[in-house]
Image (cartoon, rainbow, N blue to C red):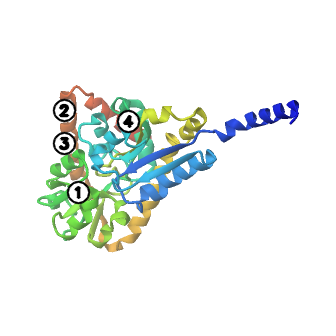
Amino acid sequence: MKKSSFLALLLACGSLAPAVAAERVTLKIAHFLPASSNAQQHVIQPWCDTLARESEQRIQCQIYPSMQLGGTPGQLPDQVRNGVVDIVWTAPGYSPGRFPRSEAVELPFMLPANGVQASKIIWQFYQQALQEDYKGYRVLALHSDGGMQLHTTGKAVRSLEDFKGLKLRASSRMSARLATGLGAAPVSMPAAQLTESLSKGVIDGALASWELIPALKLDEVTQHHTDVPEGRPTFSITLLGMLMNPRSYERMPDDLKAILDRNSGDALVQRFGEAWENELARARDMVARDSVASFEPAAYQNLREAGDKVTAEWVADAEGKGLAGGQLADRLRELSRAAGVEL
């Protein structure tokens, strides 16, 4: 081979090297719900598909639903922080004491019963007041579960008095406080145990989002569903979010970081919100129309007053721990009002 031809070949090979050697990234993602859940089917998997498409398949995901890597839902923050996985989708409230300021998001009757609007408020609240809670994580999104309704088996609940003596599943420390404040007995359990516990009479009902109805087939074991009056703040919400290990992020090439960044934050919050809106509507259509009712205004006001006491107790506890509980509650109210929520 002539020397000039050999040099030309070397140059050609060199120009191809970056494309051949373009780094690929596989993101391990864990969460606590089944693969068939709204979270995976309508957000996590489509989000991964978007990352793959925009990166020309250089970003791939391995998703581990239903705690396939072991542990409990409350340990997901540890799994991502310790590098067992790169990303988790979790409920911060499942890890009591880990994210103390974030409990304010779940205070009673603060946020609307929907996906998009509540999630936008939460993301603003995170940016302004909650970042201290998430040191050691890269927060990709925080969002609402669409708000809690009351789903019961044998007894329809229409007033504050009807709560007395009920055993209600509570998903977090805040919803347990609320159940107690309403006169019920809170029972803590993972979402995966909810359907069986209702069917066997271990509990009488649950404060839970409509979104859980299809995922857990709650329509088959509950007969009564009570909501807040239209347009009014819901009982509480379960804060949900996607957290990433910062080291996993820093290891990514800059061009792949840019793809991840533009599909996270506001964009991912919007994606979660829309998916929850769609699922809330679908879930309501799954139950018999005559099984759904709303509290009358006077009864709702009684619930609000009970919820206000719960908020006051949380503020006092938070401030006793050195947190600005009152300021956090006030800021969340301000953001809700600014978004048009009737508090």
- Give yes or no for contact between labels 3 and 2 (Cβ–Cβ under 8 Å): no
Between marks 2 and 1 in the image, the one whose residue lies nearer the viewer = 2
> Which mark is first along the chain, 4 or 1?
1
Residue under label 2, please give it: 316
Residue type for callout 3: Lys
Regarding mark 4 in the picture, which secondary structure is present there?
A: helix
Regarding mark 1 in the picture, which secondary structure is present there?
A: helix
The residue under the point 25% across, 28% down is 323
Residue under label 1, please give it: 299
The residue under the point 41% across, 36% down is 245
Regarding mark 2 in the picture, which secondary structure is present there?
A: helix
Residue under label 3, please give it: 309
Regarding mark 3 in the picture, which secondary structure is present there?
A: helix
Q: Say few, some or many: other residues with alpha carbon within 10 Å of mark 3 (under 14 / 14 to 19 / 20 or more).
A: some
Q: Nearer the viewer, residue 167 or 182?
A: 167
Residue 142 showing in the rendered view: no
> Which mark is first along the chain, 4 or 3?
3
> Which mark is first along the chain, 2 or 3?
3
Relative image position of residue 243 (x, y in whole percent): 40, 40
Left or right of 244 in this view: 306:
left
Q: Say few, some or many: other residues with alpha carbon within 10 Å of mark 4 (under 14 / 14 to 19 / 20 or more).
A: some
Relative image position of residue 188 (x, y in whole percent): 19, 53
Task: Answer above or below: position of 157 versus 81.
Answer: below
- Give yes or no for contact between labels 1 and 4 (Cβ–Cβ under 8 Å): no
Q: Nearer the viewer, residue 80 or 309?
A: 80
The residue under the point 88% across, 33% down is 2
CA gap, disc 3 to disc 4? 19 Å
CA gap, disc 1 to disc 3? 16 Å
